[in-house]
Image (cartoon, grey):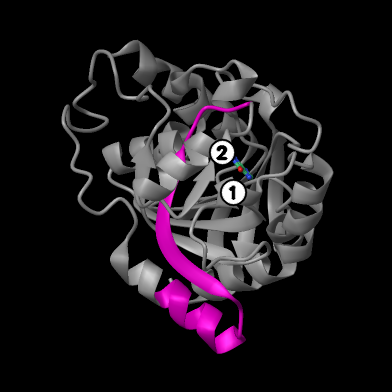
Amino acid sequence: MSELKQQIELAVQAIRKETDFAPRIGIILGTGLGGVAREIQAEKTIEYARIPGFPRPTMEDHAGILHFGRLEGQPIVAMQGRFHLYEGYSPAQITFPVRVLKALGIDTLVVSNAAGGINRKFQAGDLMILDDHINFMGVNPLVGANDDTLGPRFPDMSEPYDKKLVALGMDIALAQGFRCHRGTYIAVTGPCLETAAEYRMFGVMQADAVGMSTVPEVIVAKHAGLRVFGVSVITDMCIPETLKPADISEIIAIANEAEPRLTQLILRLISKM
Ligand code: HPA
């Protein structure tokens, strides 16, 4: 058995000592987007610190708790607190929880994040449903020996985000009257924000939004055969000609302001899965 598979089994055993809950949908809750966590009818919560192999978040607003329970009647497991490359974790560490959720039985992964708007039609506070991505992180979590029992050596990426879920998400957002787009997310490592020249380049590359997360988890989810839905909150606009110093407190304020809309979108989507 591969070392990775052994680590997954240890984590699953530790979780199974505490709960036999069988989730179908995994949810990764991103920056300032904990609203969904409050809606969960929890059966069990487990701190990451109690799960072998789970890193501990270094950022205070990323709590580090696994919630098992129901959302809209569906059995889910939600990660409150996620890991980023800029914190110093390896691509393998960041994506390990996705492996564990798959081993617990999920077939679908829902991810959210905060992102900067590259597409000039966007406004801060808008939602964007991911329909593709560009991995611009310079690393890939699948580099290294492949365990064929976990997924193929050369996983397909022709449809990283499930087209039916993208369409369903757009229908829900439209019906709710939310400003919502579909687009391409480009992932960078951070932690610094981008220069005007970099934002201009991302525009030329036809990216619609830029952020520091999500893509490693999605790559591993696809490797594991999961169906994926991703959504960004556009927290700031990245227009090269008028670039001002980034205000992180403002970015967090916009993420919080958008939280009820994101929560509604995710709840309604999950109710239809
Ligand atoms: N760049 C990268 N990540 C981000 C940004 C940005 O401009 N805004 C929010 N997350």
Ligand 1 shows up in which quadrant of the image? top right
Q: Position of residue 45 (x, y in %)?
A: 71, 43
Residue 116 relative to residue 125: left or right: left
Q: Count the marks.
A: 2
Along the polypeptide, which appears first: circle 1 or circle 2?
Answer: 2
Q: Neighbour class for label 2 at 10 Å: few (<14), some, many (≥20)?
A: some
Residue 253 relative to residue 227: left or right: right
Magenta segment includes 17: no
> Where on the picture, by quarter, is residue 162?
bottom left
* Element assignment for label 2: helix
Amino acid type, residue under disc 1 in the picture: Glu
Q: Is residue 213 visible?
A: no
Residue at mark 1: 241
Residues 15 and 94: in front is 94
Magenta segment includes 187: yes
Amino acid type, residue under disc 2 in the picture: Ala
- Which residue appears at 60% of the width and 85% of the height? 176
Residue 62 relative to residue 70: left or right: right
Q: Pick the quarter of the image with the N terminus.
A: top left
Q: Is residue 221 above or below residue 83?
A: below
- Which residue appears at 29% of the width and 18% of the height? 143
> Where on the picture, by quarter, is residue 173?
bottom right
Q: Mark 1 and mark 2 in contact? Answer it, CB < 8 Å.
A: yes
Residue at mark 2: 196
Q: Position of residue 127 (x, y in %)?
A: 58, 65
> What residue span does the magenta drawing correspond to?
168-191
- Which residue appears at 30% of the width and 43% of the height? 222
Q: Is residue 142 above or below residue 126?
A: above
* Element assignment for label 1: helix
Mark 1, mark 2: which one is toward the viewer? 1
Q: Is residue 177 above or below residue 242?
A: below
Q: Neighbour class for label 1 at 10 Å: few (<14), some, many (≥20)?
A: few
